[in-house]
Amino acid sequence: MDTTVGSGWGRVHNIGLISDRQNLLFLGGLLFFSGIVLFAVYKLKQTPADEAKVKGELENKQKVAQEGVTGQAYLKCRICRQCVESCRSCSV
């Protein structure tokens, strides 16, 4: 962000633009550190039981995702909706 403006004597620094830049930097730093503090407080309040629950939910989601690839939906013929092993008439 350029803080200079043209004038009759050449380019001079605009105090208003310098102030805007300083305010934005301060606000960004404040938001960054606030996020770090909130994250740390959240992690300190989390109990081992909560961590186990979150880990179990993640494992269940992964299991469901893996079953989706190799599950029953892929063992049926998409044309006649019969089992792929017994579906020889469709020649799929």
Image: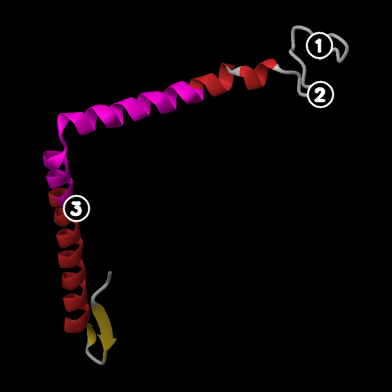
Q: Up-down: is 2 above or below 70?
A: below
Magenta segment range?
38-65
Q: Position of residue 5 (x, y in %)?
A: 27, 82
Q: Amino acid at mark 1?
A: Cys
CB within 8 Å, label 2 to label 1: yes
Foreground of the two, 9 or 82: 82
Residue 70, quarter of the rendered image: top right
Q: Amino acid at mark 2?
A: Ile
Mark 3 against mark 1, which lies toward the viewer?
1
- Read off the residue under disc 2: 79
Q: Secondary structure at mark 2?
A: loop
Residue at mark 2 to residue at mark 3: CA–CA distance? 52 Å
Residue at mark 2 to residue at mark 1: CA–CA distance? 10 Å
Q: Quadrant of the N terminus?
A: bottom left
Q: Position of residue 42 (x, y in %)?
A: 17, 44
Q: Quadrant of the C terminus?
A: top right
- Read off the residue under disc 3: 35
Instruction: Please identify the dominant SS of the magenta region.
Output: helix
Q: Secondary structure at mark 3?
A: helix
The single residue placed furthest to the right in the displayed view is 89
Q: Amino acid at mark 3?
A: Gly
Q: Up-down: is 60 above or below 1?
A: above
